[in-house]
Image (tube, rainbow, N blue to C red):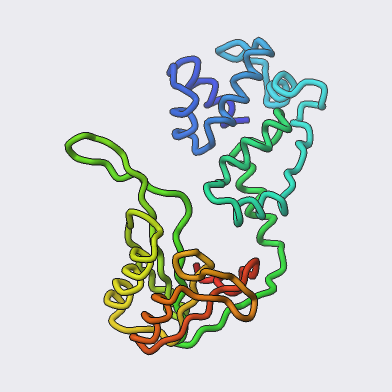
C-alpha cells in the first residue's frame, strides 16, 4: 500500500503521467492506469484522510473482496509460448494485450511477465544440444523486415536481415540485404565465412526457396548454385527438417 500511496501522490500533487509514474516506481504504466482508474471510480480523496489505514485504502480500491484484489484469470501460458516462438513479430506485450482484451480486469503487464517467467522456470527441459567446434552453422532470415531510409528523399525501403550462427561458439554474423533472392542468400554465406575466418563442416539452412527448392525430411532438393557453393568451399548442406525446431535450435 505504501507504493499506491506514493502513486497517488505523484499523480495528484506531481501531476505526472502514468508512464512517468511507472518509471519512477518501477512498475508498468498499465498497472498505474488501472490503479488510477480504480481511485477515480472509488472517489478516493487526496490527501488521504488521516484515519485511513492500509486496509481502508485496499477496501476502497478493491471493493467486495475483503479489501484484497480478486484472483485474476491465469493466461494460457502454453498457447502464449507457442505464439511467441512460431509467430514472427509476436512479443510479450502483444500477447498481454490479447490476454487483456479477453480479460479486461486481468493481470497488469509487469505481473504478466513475472508469472510467465515463473511458469517457464517450472517447465521440464527435454532437449540439450551438443555441438562440436567447426561442425555446424545455421542460416536463416530473422523475423520481420527493417526499414532502410534514403538520406535524400527520406523514403523507407524494407530490407531483410540475414543471420548465420555457429553451433559451438554461438558466434553470430548478420547483415542487412535488399531481398531474399538466391544472389543475396549466397552472398550472405560468403560474407559469414569471411567474418569467421573459416568454413564449418556442415551448413544447416532453414527451408527457404533461395536455398531449398523442395523441402523433404530425407531427400530435400537444393538450388544448384547453393550446391555449387558448398562444393567450392568443401562443405555440405543439410537443411533443417520441416517443423523440427531441434534441427535449428541455435538460431
State the image quarter where residue 124 is shown: bottom right
Question: The N terminus lies in which quarter of the figure?
Answer: top right
Residue 149 higher or lower than 170, as above or below: above
Q: Quadrant of residue 184?
A: bottom left
Left or right, 169 with respect to 49, comes to left
Front residue of 250/147: it is 147
Q: Residue at left 31%, top 69%?
A: 187
Judged from this view, the residue extending furthest toward the front is: 224
The picture places residue 147, in percent across and down from the top left corner, at: 34, 44
Decide which of 250, 226 is in the foreground and name it.
Answer: 226
For image coordinates 33% across by 54% down, the residue present is 178
Q: Please report the residue visible at 73 percent of the width from the left and 33 percent of the height from the top.
A: 102
Q: Is residue 178 left or right of residue 76?
A: left
**Residue 244 at what x, y percent from top left?**
64, 70
In the rendered image, residue 173, in percent from the top left (x then y), is placed at 35, 68
User: In this view of the protein, which residue sits in the foreground, 98 or 220?
Assistant: 220
In this view, 75 is above or below 236: above
How many numbered dots are placed on residues in this image? 0
Vertical relation: 48 (above or below) 3: above
Q: Image point 34% across, 65% down: which residue?
A: 183
- Percent across and percent down for residue 177 are 33, 57
In the rendered image, which quarter is residue 86 located in? bottom right
Of residue 238 and residue 87, the one placed in the foreground of this image is 238
Indicate whether 236 appears above or below 21: below
Amino acid at each position: 500500500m505504501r507504493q499506491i500511496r506514493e502513486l497517488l501522490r505523484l499523480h495528484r500533487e506531481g501531476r505526472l503521467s502514468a508512464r512517468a509514474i511507472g518509471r519512477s516506481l518501477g512498475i508498468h504504466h498499465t498497472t498505474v492506469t488501472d490503479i488510477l482508474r480504480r481511485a477515480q471510480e472509488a472517489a478516493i480523496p487526496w490527501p488521504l484522510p488521516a484515519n485511513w489505514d492500509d486496509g481502508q485504502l485496499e477496501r476502497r480500491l478493491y471493493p467486495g473482496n475483503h479489501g484484497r484484489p480478486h484472483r485474476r484469470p491465469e493466461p494460457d501460458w502454453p498457447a502464449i509460448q507457442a505464439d511467441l516462438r512460431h509467430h514472427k513479430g509476436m512479443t510479450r506485450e502483444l500477447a498481454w494485450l490479447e490476454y487483456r482484451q479477453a480479460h479486461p480486469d486481468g493481470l497488469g503487464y509487469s505481473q504478466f511477465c513475472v508469472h510467465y517467467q515463473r511458469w517457464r522456470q517450472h517447465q521440464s527441459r527435454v532437449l540439450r544440444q551438443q555441438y562440436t567446434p567447426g561442425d555446424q552453422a545455421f542460416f536463416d532470415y530473422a523475423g520481420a523486415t527493417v526499414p532502410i531510409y534514403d538520406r535524400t528523399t527520406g523514403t523507407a525501403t524494407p530490407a531483410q536481415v540475414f543471420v548465420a550462427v555457429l553451433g559451438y561458439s554461438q558466434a553470430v554474423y548478420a547483415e542487412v540485404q535488399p531481398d531474399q533472392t538466391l544472389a543475396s542468400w549466397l552472398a550472405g554465406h560468403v560474407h559469414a565465412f569471411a567474418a569467421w575466418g573459416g568454413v564449418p563442416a556442415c551448413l544447416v539452412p532453414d527451408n527457404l526457396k533461395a536455398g531449398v527448392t523442395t523441402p523433404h525430411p530425407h531427400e530435400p532438393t537444393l538450388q544448384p548454385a547453393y550446391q555449387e557453393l558448398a562444393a567450392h568451399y568443401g562443405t555440405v548442406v543439410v537443411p533443417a527438417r520441416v517443423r523440427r525446431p531441434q534441427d535449428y535450435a541455435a538460431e
